[in-house]
Amino acid sequence: MKKIYLYGNWKMNMTVAETKKFFEDFAPVYAQFKNDSGLEVGVFAPFTSLWAAAEGAKANGVVFGAENIYFEPKGAFTGEVSIPMVKETGATHVILGHSERRHIFGESDELVAKKTKAALDAGLIPVFCYGETLDERESGHTFDVMTRQLDAILKILSPDEIRKVIYAYEPVWAIGTGKSATSEQAQEVCEWSRKLIKDPNVVILYGGSVKGSNAKELLSMKDIDGALVGGASLKPASFIEIYAEYKK
């Protein structure tokens, strides 16, 4: 079986105390899969909980990262967090270009591309998110939108850098709505993405209301290498259930 990447995006959830409690509860749930070479688990915590996440991740042998960074290493950027600040916690990954950053906070394709390049230059692994809104899908612009989003980084990265990025297709209409793309829809986009990127070996995740009940169908698709999970990642049982259901 292929290797599965199970990444949890906690968004604006999980205080330090809640993060510590998560990992206390996570250890026994994860124990049955801890030595499974076919699984890589990662958690992405808010900035204030990164140190607590570092402790828990190290104790359980999982990777962890931040949910965002700024591309400048330091300076007069009130409220931003730099890559050196994130790396100091031991974080190895960072989510970039999430639809909430793009649509709520107005991050442009160019800004996301700058962040992606800066992360790679500093040795962080970017989890690059891309995806279309419901209006864009219904108007037939799904692939136009995603070509634009992906091209923003593909045109400034070397082939080696492109290979290091983890790509996460997240249809905006399926995030936090309880409505997931069908396995066929997700597979179609992930297969198309692999061809656009021109590297068959890149890791491509699907994100958007992934849970135990739809995990096997989604993760069994040929071009889907794992899941970027939102709400279901906040509880260890529902998070690990995704992989448990896939393995059945």
Image (cartoon, rainbow, N blue to C red):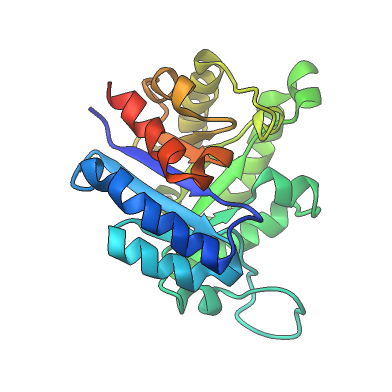
Place of residue 186 in the rendered image (x, y in percent of width and height, measured from the top left): 53, 22
Q: Residue at x 29, y 48 (%)?
A: 28
Quarter of image, res 174: top right
Q: Residue at x 69, y 25 (%)?
A: 142
Vertical placement of residue 236 versus 73, above or below: above
Q: Residue at x 63, y 55 (%)?
A: 13
Residue 11 seen by the camera:
yes
Quarter of image, res 60: bottom left
Number of residue marks: 0
**Which residue is at the front of the view, 173 or 200?**
173
Place of residue 133 in the rendered image (x, y in percent of width and height, measured from the top left): 75, 30
**Which residue is at the front of the view, 229 or 109?**
229
Q: Is the C terminus in the top left, top right, bottom left or bottom right quadrant? A: top left
Q: Residue at x 64, y 76 (%)?
A: 72
Place of residue 224 in the rendered image (x, y in percent of width and height, measured from the top left): 42, 28
Q: Is residue 77 left or right of residue 68?
A: right
Residue 158 seen by the camera:
no
**Which residue is at the front of the view, 140 or 45?**
45
Place of residue 221 in the rendered image (x, y in percent of width and height, measured from the top left): 40, 20
Q: Is residue 93 left or right of residue 46?
A: left
Q: Is residue 30 left or right of residue 140?
A: left
Vertical placement of residue 138 versus 32, above or below: above
